[in-house]
């Protein structure tokens, strides 16, 4: 059985006295954690939430998020995680579309819920710390810790996160207990010898995002590790926590690792307790990976996934080997192919990564499609969107990722770029990631992103947004010349703009639509 909450129950029974969650100097044992999830589930039942009922969790990374998440599953409900940086306009659609009945949030965020409450099915708002007008405090909401866990099938919906919505209205992703449990188990297995009670996981990836939810929180609790949440990314706080508590596992997005290596005291920091670092969310520049490993003597293993795939589909592992620049091989039980527009498979290259100056990427790349137990049931109330993203082929249901990549004969996959990010300039395809990789090699560049902008002559042309390192003596012309010296003429950025920072989502992805002025 792959019901997610029954697996957590087994862990709590097997390791009752081990630490489940550590926050701000306080340990919560698995026995205490299980009791608190029961109390929250009891509160939901008393509030009238039945099996399949939606519960919005509108919080940063706090113990109450972890308790509310698993407490909702114990009650038979469905978690609707929401970004705590969102305002009323942004949560309105999520609450209305999902039909959430209860929302758990902070007192300061409750006003955003209040502004849209009358337009939704929300009847109860639970606030952490203290109640404000129209809410009940988290402590008052809790009921009987011995609440009997609701019986839910593996195929029942457990969580309904929403896609980022950068190209339209966010879509609710229907993830089942089987989706989440199978991916949490697979994620835990990627750690050498698995996650154990000796492991301490840095919980800085947002829990409202599927990467932090599955690979960090659920994988840790799946096997009895300890989860150490941080409400927001701060490199110095992360360094302090890793050093003082001797954390053993860390997952992050490329922006976090780039931030870490650019800290003034990075060379003096001791991260030797870490036995594995993972990265996902977007491709990590090779230069950032190399510099982090040189500074801290710990390897970063790159993986790949999407909200719709719970999320992990590929990962480099210590046991099976790592290929820098690759997203790794498929996880056990997951299948992937590279296909063209007619869903014909594109054969692998002999060995990757390929030299992009010698190989025509258009001949070896295609869209990455995946199939497996981690692939979502579908989008909530979006039948047209489901028809677009799924293809039945060879007895399997394949999900279209929208990412362009290739694979090699050894089974490693490589992502070139998002299909929507590709730049077509005068008939030539330019993949922004290739240019970004080069920019990170420049000694004066701290951060960079590349987009296509309108051009009367070429249709589109390449523009680079660059964050210079503090005190760097460099000009936009020097950056352009550096690219021209190392890339084909049509690939080099004809415009370079220096900026103080890049617009990013809370999960570290560059918001390229903002850079393009959309």
Image (cartoon, helix red, strand yellow):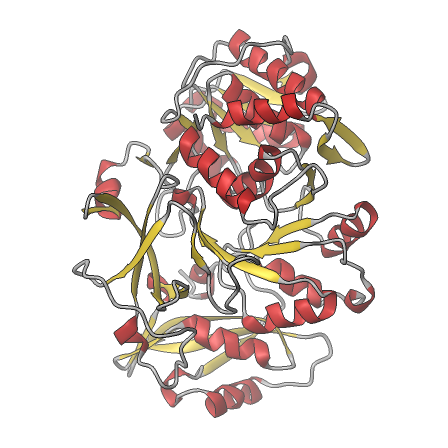
In the image, is 327 to the left or to the right of 228?
Answer: left
Assign the C terminus to one quadrant of the image: bottom left
Can residue 172 be seen here? The reply is: yes
Q: Picture coordinates of residue 372 (x, y %)?
A: 34, 43
Of 291 and 413, nearer the camera is 413
In the image, is 398 to the left or to the right of 220?
Answer: left
**Snapshot quadrant of residue 67:** top right
- Residue sitting at x 45%, y 71%: 433
Can residue 137 be seen here? The reply is: no
Assign the N terminus to one quadrant of the image: top left
Count of numbered marks: 0
Of 86 and 484, nearer the camera is 484
Q: Picture coordinates of residue 341 (x, y %)?
A: 20, 61
Q: Picture coordinates of residue 33 (x, y %)?
A: 67, 23
Residue at the outermost left position = 342
Q: Picture coordinates of residue 312 (x, y %)?
A: 46, 48
Does residue 414 sit above or below 482 in this rendering? Answer: above
Of 518 and 234, nearer the camera is 234
Does residue 287 sit above or below 373 in this rendering? Answer: below
- Residue sitting at x 29%, y 81%: 458
Does residue 257 sit above or below 55 in this rendering? Answer: below
Does residue 322 sit above or below 30 in this rendering? Answer: below
- Residue sitting at x 63%, y 58%: 256
In the image, is 33 to the left or to the right of 269?
Answer: left
């Amino acid at each position: 059985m792959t019901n997610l909450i029954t697996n957590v129950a087994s862990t709590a029974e097997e390791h009752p006295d081990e630490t489940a969650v550590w926050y701000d100097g306080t340990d919560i044992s698995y026995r205490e954690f299980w009791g608190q999830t029961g109390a929250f589930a009891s509160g939901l039942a008393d509030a009238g939430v039945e099996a399949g009922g939606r519960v919005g969790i509108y919080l940063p990374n706090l113990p109450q998020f972890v308790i509310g998440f698993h407490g909702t599953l114990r009650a038979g409900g469905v978690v609707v995680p929401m970004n705590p940086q969102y305002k009323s306009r942004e949560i309105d659609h999520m609450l209305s579309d999902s039909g959430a009945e209860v929302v758990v949030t902070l007192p300061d965020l409750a006003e955003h819920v209040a502004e849209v409450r009358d337009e939704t099915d929300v009847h109860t708002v639970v606030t952490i710390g203290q109640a404000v007008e129209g809410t009940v405090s988290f402590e008052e909401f809790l009921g009987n810790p011995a609440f009997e866990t609701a019986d839910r099938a593996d195929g029942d919906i457990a969580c309904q996160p929403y896609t980022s919505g950068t190209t339209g209205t966010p879509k609710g992703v229907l993830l089942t207990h089987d989706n989440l449990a199978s991916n949490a188990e697979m994620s835990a297995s990627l750690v050498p010898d698995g996650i154990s009670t000796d492991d301490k996981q840095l919980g800085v990836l947002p829990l409202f995002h599927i990467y932090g939810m599955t690979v960090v929180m659920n994988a840790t609790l799946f096997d009895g590790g300890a989860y150490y949440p941080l409400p927001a990314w701060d490199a110095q706080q992360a360094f302090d926590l890793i050093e003082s508590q001797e954390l053993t596992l860390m997952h992050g997005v490329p922006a976090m690792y780039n931030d870490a290596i650019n800290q003034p005291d990075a060379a003096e920091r001791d991260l030797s307790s870490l036995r594995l670092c993972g990265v996902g969310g977007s491709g990590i520049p090779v230069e950032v990976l190399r510099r982090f490993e040189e500074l801290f003597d710990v390897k970063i293993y790159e993986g790949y996934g999407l909200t719709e795939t719970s999320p992990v589909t590929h990962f480099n592992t210590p046991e099976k080997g790592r290929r820098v620049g690759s997203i790794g091989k498929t996880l056990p039980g997951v299948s992937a192919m590279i296909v063209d527009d007619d869903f014909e498979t594109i054969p692998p290259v002999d060995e990757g990564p390929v030299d992009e100056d010698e190989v025509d990427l258009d001949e070896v790349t295609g869209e990455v499609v995946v199939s497996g137990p981690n692939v979502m049931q579908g989008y909530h109330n979006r039948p047209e969107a489901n028809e677009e993203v799924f293809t039945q082929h060879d007895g399997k249901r394949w999900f279209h990722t929208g990412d362009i990549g290739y694979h090699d004969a050894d089974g490693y996959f490589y992502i070139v770029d998002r299909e929507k990010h590709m730049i077509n300039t005068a008939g030539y395809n330019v993949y922004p990631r290739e240019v970004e990789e080069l920019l990170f090699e420049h000694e004066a560049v701290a951060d960079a992103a590349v987009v296509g902008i309108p051009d009367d002559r070429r249709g589109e042309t390449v523009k680079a947004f660059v964050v210079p390192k503090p005190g760097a003596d460099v000009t936009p012309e020097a950056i352009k010349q550096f690219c021209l010296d190392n890339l084909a003429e049509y690939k080099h950025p004809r415009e370079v703009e220096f900026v103080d920072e890049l617009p990013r989502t809370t999960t570290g992805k560059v918001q390229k639509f903002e850079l393009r002025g959309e």
